[in-house]
Amino acid sequence: MKVLIINGSPHKKNTTWRALDEIRKTLESEGIEAEIYDVPADTAGCLGCNYCSKNGHCVRRDQVNDIAARLDSIDGIIVGTPTYYASPSGSLIAFMDRLFYSAGSKLSKKPAAAVAIARRGGTETSFDVLNKYFTINEMPVISSTYWNNVFGFNPDDAEKDLEGLQTMRNLARNMAWILKAIDAGKKAGIMPPKTEESVYTSFGDGK
Ligand SMILES: Cc1cc2nc3c(=O)[nH]c(=O)nc-3n(C[C@H](O)[C@H](O)[C@H](O)COP(=O)(O)O)c2cc1C
């Protein structure tokens, strides 16, 4: 079983990474494979062109398509972000919009969690934005012993946030538990429920 941990910070090994690495180490100690993927800082946003709905991949041929192509082998995701003006980073939002719009079906019914990092404030609103991708896509949201925050301006600050790092470890153990429970359920014949065919009510002709 494998968890993809998405680092939405433009800084490769900084504060957000420090929190996510605590999750990675704990998942591995629970026997779950885990990989941290750094979202490229120059990730461009969704064009809203709907090319992906006809072609199955984003019209921008970049790292979003590379990750989308790997999602069948991913059992759960954790998405971490630095807080920028009380929101996730712009590059992460660009990445998530395009990944979920073009390949969200490959993540449906798989467990997920969001993590937000800040020097001081705005983590809850960032957390809320990220959880919206999961809850429109039938993804069980994994929780912890606090909202999933670590505070710090740099990795040294994060190291001092003992409660934040503990929240990361408890989150990782809960993710490992649910993944193992889903796997055991499948072996016992308990499969994810079938989703109804979608009714698309947009108060117009949808064109
Ligand atoms: C554009 C920008 C906006 C920021 N906005 C906030 C904010 O709203 N609240 C806050 O506490 N910190 C804010 N920060 C600080 C970062 O969230 C904080 O330094 C975080 O540790 C960065 O994570 P990183 O080291 O992984 O990049 C902001 C930083 C930048 C660059």
Image: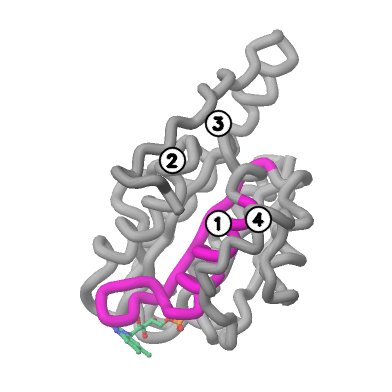
Q: Name the disc covering residue 141, or none.
A: 2
Q: Mark 4: which secondary structure?
A: strand
Dot 3 falls on a residue whose secondary structure is helix
Residue at the extreme left of the image, as rendered: 121
**Residue located at (60% from left, 75% from top):** 39
Q: Which residue is mark 4?
A: 4
Structural distance between the alpha carbons of marks 1 and 3 = 25 Å
User: To which residue does mark 3 refer?
Assistant: 178
Spatial separation of the CA atoms under disc 2 and disc 3: 10 Å
SS label for mark 1: helix
Q: For the residue with label 4, is its CB less than 8 Å from the closest atom of ligand 1?
A: no
* Residue carrying label 1: 101
86 versus 105 height, above or below: below
Q: Quadrant of residue 100?
A: bottom right
The span from disc 3 to disc 4 (Cα, nearest Å) is: 15 Å
N-terminal of the pair, mark 4 or mark 2, is 4
Tell me the quadrant of ligand 1: bottom left
Residue 163 appears anywhere in the view: no
Mark 2 residue crowding within 10 angstroms, few (<14) / some (14–19) / many (20+): some
Mark 2 in CB contact with mark 1 (< 8 angstroms): no
**Marks 3 and 4, the one that precedes in the sequence:** 4
**Residue type, numbered disc 1:** Tyr
User: Residue 204 vs residue 77: left or right?
Assistant: left
- Element type where label 2 sits in the image: loop
